[in-house]
Image: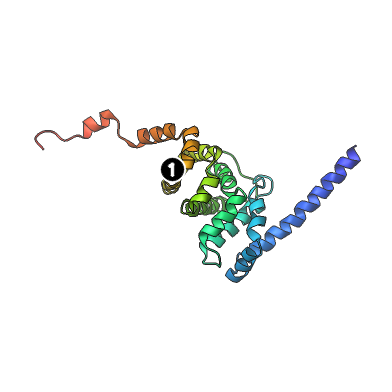
Amino acid sequence: DPLWSRGLGDVYKRQVQVRLQVAKFIGILNLSEKALSMFDSCGGLRLVSKFVEEDFDTTPTFPLIAIESIHNILAKDLSRSKSDLCRILSKHGVIFWLVVLLNRLVKYDQKPLIKNVSKEQVEITIERIIDIIKYFSQSETKVRISIGSIDLFKLIFKLFDNLKLSHQLTLLKFVKSMSCISEVLKNLYHAEILEFLVKLLKSYIPSKGCLLYTSPSPRD
């Protein structure tokens, strides 16, 4: 029934508008450490975790504000420990959705972004995602086990070449911290980490021809 479908569409639009107002309110909370601390204490991480899953191309406000909030809560010295915050976020699968979004953002030169999202916003968001991943690499073993899925590692290896060097180093440290946990090694193997590392070595080790050309003569 077209009328029924149109009615559902109108309801969805109203729901999106209401949720957008909630997201904008959360954005205002980011301006105050005290307000952000209260938001965290009231279970705010659960709410913003859901916003991270929203489609960036359709409603970028949700993931952008969510990432800003998560980054601020982790970066600022609030009431909870960083490990507790990572544990809460891991329950909602945040790290995977962050990497999914990262995979989208690193391609902004190849695929046009939607209007109202500047290149500067994209770069800031990429920096924030990388910072959040860094906090997870320092989290307790149980948290790292819970987030160490095959899909997560495959996605990291896939987008790796599109990152700048400093971001690549952060992801390598993250992978290294995960590889120290025996329960995660199997997932790394199935995500083809060996192929990834061999490719990485080939790209940074000089070729034989280059080594021959640059090697010193016996007289030197």
Q: Is residue 162 visible?
A: no
Classify residue 24 as left or right of residue 8: left
The 10 Å Cα crowd at callout 1, few under 14, some 14 to 19, many 20 or more, is some
Q: Quadrant of the N terminus?
A: top right
Q: Quadrant of the C terminus?
A: top left
x and y, in percent, of residue 50 in the image? 66, 51
Tell which of 58 and 34 is nearer to you. 34
SS for callout 1:
helix
Residue at image position (51%, 58%) is 83
Q: Quadrant of residue 70?
A: bottom right
x and y, in percent, of residue 119 in the image? 55, 50
Q: Is residue 57 visible?
A: yes
Vertical relation: 126 (above or below) 43: above
Across the whole image, how many numbered discs are drawn on residues?
A: 1
Classify residue 59 as left or right of residue 73: right
Q: Which residue position holds label 1? A: 179
